[in-house]
Amino acid sequence: MISLVYPRGTLERAAARAMKWVAAGYDLASPHRRGIVVLAYHRIGRRSSLRVDLPEWLFDEQMERLAEGAGVIDLDSALAALAQDAPVGPDPAVVTFDDGTADFVEVALPILVRHRVPATVYVATRFVDEGRSFPHEGPPVSWAALADAVSTGFVTVGSHTHSHALLDRLPASVVGEELDRSVDLIGERLGVTARHFAYPKALPGSHAAEAAVRRRFVSAALAGTRPNPYRTTDAYRLARSPLQVEDGLTFFTRKVSGGMRVEDSVRQLANRFRLGLVRE
């Protein structure tokens, strides 16, 4: 879904920021589209050089702005709202996290609770169950810590597959095992049902994989960086807007308002090319 590693050189950083300004300019020339924006976070605390590892202060400020603005609703409430006509008031946002790294509980959760912001965390259960670190020095959250997070009433746990597998590259028989193992572990360890799913790397699976996802969950998330429109959104193809360090507060505000779609289109094209080369 996104380029994870922070641009190394001055030119790369300048190019990344220039793309954001281009996307923001395109937004100004485009009509505003109503809908619910689903924000996608990965890590908080700057424990790595990843572009998606936000400083704690920045995440805190972003959550404060969300809470004071149109507000944040949980994913189940968002799905119910999307099945109806647009509300009279402003459109709320949804906060989600991917993977299940320890910083979600250690850093992000206290901020979420303080601002009373609900969040869904999509967990790749193999890393949690085996205590296996995610790439780029990402220690996994523990089941006990996740259980404490759920007990706050602000956290919903969804599936991100068992091993963070790309579903478009697995045989149909293996897809079912990946999904079922994840759902079963979440149920066994946390006593909750994983009702929501996020595709790893935000890449859709094969037709068989998508059918398997639809049989097991009530929603599935992809990429998109755009609002999910009322009445017409397919709950199994939810668009999410990824947050990066260089978004700061300016581009964060634009993403919350449904903007920055051009940036995401360029990123998806680049990632498909990159992942395609890896696959070859």
Image (spheres, grey):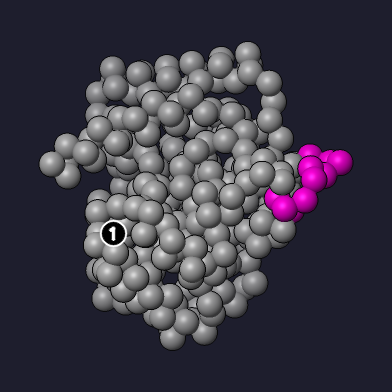
Q: Can you say whether 94 is above or below 102 in the image?
A: above
43 horizontally vs 78: left or right: left
Residue 86 part of the magenta segment = yes
Residue 226: where, in percent of width, then height? 57, 35
The amino acid type of the residue labelled 1 equals Ala
Residue closer to the observer: 142 or 263: 263
> Which quadrant of the view contains residue 88?
top right
The reply to whether residue 111 is visible in this rendering is: no
Residue position for label 1: 165
Q: Residue at x 63, y 13 (%)?
A: 29
Q: Residue at x 71, y 35 (%)?
A: 34
Residue 161 part of the magenta segment = no
Which secondary structure dominates the residues rendered in magenta? loop
Q: Residues within 10 Å of mark 1 (few under 14, many from 20)?
A: some
Q: How many marks?
A: 1
Residue 17: where, in percent of width, then height? 42, 22
Residue 66: where, in percent of width, then height? 67, 45
Q: Which residues are magenta?
A: 81-90
The reply to whether residue 226 is visible in this rendering is: yes
